[in-house]
Amino acid sequence: ATSVLTALPVFVFGQLALAGPWLSHRFGLRRSLLIVLVLLTAGSALRVGPNSFTLFAGTLLAASGIAVANVLMPVVARREFPTRTGLMLGLSTTATIGSVAAAAGLTVPIANALDAGWRAGLGIWAALTGLTLVIWLPFAVGRHERDEGEAPHISRALFRSPLAWMITLFFGLQSLNVYVVVNWLPSIYQDHGYSDTAAGGLLALNVLVQLPVCLVTPSLASRARRQHPFVLGVIACSAIAFLGILLSPTKPAVLWLVVLGFAQGAAFPLCLSFLVLRTRTHAETTQLSTMMQSIGYLIAGLGPLVFGALHAATDPWRGPMVFLLALLVPELVAG
């Protein structure tokens, strides 16, 4: 049940990525993001309900909103800030990663402080999402000009493009690593004697390290003539961190999480940079973003499931960590 719950959002990201272009075409870009925030707020509130059904249903609803936002945010950066696309991608990604760090590090302490269980810890994020909805409302329904939607389909030529498939594979594999770490890292360290708060703190540290890397990577990658050094850095840091967690997870745990933070902090914004650097128009950016995420997240969604299955069937953590190390090879080739 834990594996399914943690994999469910990732599969939704893949399946509903195709809804992003359709919503943008039907309602316009800004109003589509308003719909995203409604879904996210409603789902975040529902998942703190009284039973497992509300937990799973709320997760499904919130993930649906995130799936659309993932596709549309690079388009927002390119359309609204054509001369500052790299900077805006960096800021957007940094805000996303910073929120992940806050959720990972603060959810358990908030729940403990309020003495109301995990529902209180999750409920606070529904309140913040609702606040974001209120802030975005004037931009979506005010006096702003309506956005022109993009064509709600993916060109068949894109599926025949080796470049598009390599970008998609690189995105899928780096996302697989991220979701395995987010979903299973606390369990690994709890098995090594860490408290739930300490394990969450390690995850928060990993994400906080990503913040400055996320901020500068899109601008640096956009200015560079070649992006190969960035890819090599991502793979090298990932390999060092995974080997460290495999061979000596607790000594020093902080080092492995910091090194892994550098890798993950560069990988995601690098994928977003590829969307802009390898396309010529807004429509191409939307279509490649849709292909990359609809297929890439299906790849990523297998990560928590396979990792959990290997954990149950083999040596508790050795088999799963070897699995992550092996996947760095195709990730390197694709990147």
Image: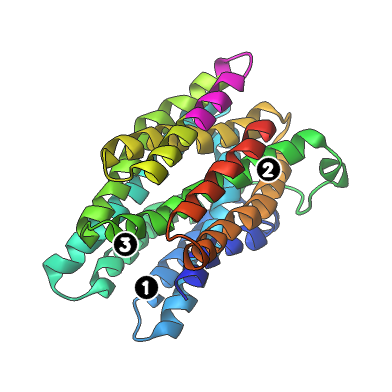
Q: Which quadrant holds the C terminus?
A: top right
Q: Residue at x 27, y 55 (%)?
A: 200
Q: Which residues are magenta?
A: 223-236
Q: Main secondary structure of the magenta part?
A: helix
Instruction: Quote the CA–CA distance across marks 3 and 2.
Output: 31 Å
Instruction: Quote the CA–CA distance across marks 2 and 1.
Output: 34 Å
Taking depth in this image into account, of 182 and 249 the one nearest to the observer is 249
Q: Quadrant of residue 231?
A: top right
Give the amino acid type for the residue marked by disc 2 in the picture. Answer: Leu
Asked which secondary structure carries label 3, the reply is helix
Measured from the top left, where is residue 22 in percent x and y?
Answer: 70, 57
Asked which secondary structure carries label 1, the reply is helix
Instruction: Quote the CA–CA distance across marks 1 and 3.
Output: 9 Å
- Residue 57 lies left or right of residue 197; in this view the side is right
Give the amino acid type for the residue marked by disc 1 in the picture. Answer: Ala
Q: Residue at x 37, y 55 (%)?
A: 132
Q: Residue at x 56, y 19 (%)?
A: 229
Q: Looking at the image, do the residues carrying marks 2 and 1 touch, with CB atoms under 8 Å apart?
A: no
Give the mark nearest the N terminus, 2 or 1.
1
Marker disc for residue 169? 2
Tell me, yes or no, if residue 32 can be seen here: no
Marker disc for residue 125? 3
Asked which secondary structure carries label 2, the reply is helix
Q: Is residue 286 above or below residue 127?
A: above
Give the mark nearest the N terminus, 3 or 2.
3
